[in-house]
Amino acid sequence: MLKCNLSTLMGKERLTIAEVIRRTGLTRNAVTTLYDERAKRIDLNTIARLCELFECTVDDLFEYIPNAER
């Protein structure tokens, strides 16, 4: 499972969803599905824009959590 840390990064920077949308040019749907951790698929451009905004790596934005049943 992948955990998206967008809400954590936004909290640290005190950014709203509207501000992330304005600064990245991403759609509200793209940002809110990641924020709410409901995304099933993610465009690489979306990841790149968020990493650029937060000056972070993909590892900072997403965290891999192994499935306990494996």
Image (tube, rainbow, N blue to C red):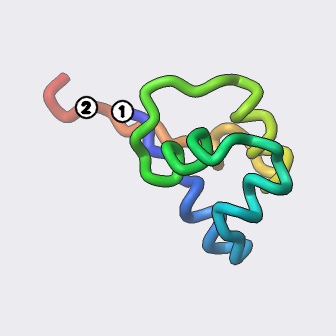
- Residue 8: x percent and y percent? 56, 64
Please state which amino acid type lies under the numbered disc 2.
Answer: Asn
| Viewer-proximal residue among 69 and 27 | 27
The reply, left or right, for residue 17 in relation to residue 54 is left
Local SS, label 2: loop
Q: Which mark is residue 1?
A: 1
Q: Residues within 10 Å of mark 1 (few under 14, many from 20)?
A: few
Which of the two labelled residues, at mark 1 and mark 2, occupies the earlier sequence position? Answer: 1
Give the residue at the far left of this rendering: 69
Name which residue lies at 19% across and 34% down: 68
Give the residue number, with chain letter if any, for mark 2: 67
Name which residue lies at 85% across and 45% down: 52
- Residue 30: x percent and y percent? 60, 39
The answer to which quarter of the image holds residue 62 is top right
Quadrant location of the N terminus? Answer: top left
**Are discs 1 and 2 less than 8 Å apart at CB?**
yes
- Residue 61: x percent and y percent? 62, 46
| 58, above or below 20, in the image | above
| 22, above or below 44, in the image | below
| Viewer-proximal residue among 55 and 17 | 17
Please state which amino acid type lies under the numbered disc 1.
Answer: Met
Name which residue lies at 70% across and 24% down: 44
| 70, above or below 8, in the image | above
User: Disc 1 versus disc 2: distance between alpha carbons?
Assistant: 7 Å
Q: Residues within 10 Å of mark 2 (few under 14, many from 20)?
A: few
The answer to which quarter of the image holds residue 26 is top right
Name which residue lies at 76% across and 27% down: 45
Local SS, label 1: loop
Quadrant location of the C terminus? Answer: top left
The reply, left or right, for residue 1 in relation to residue 35 is left
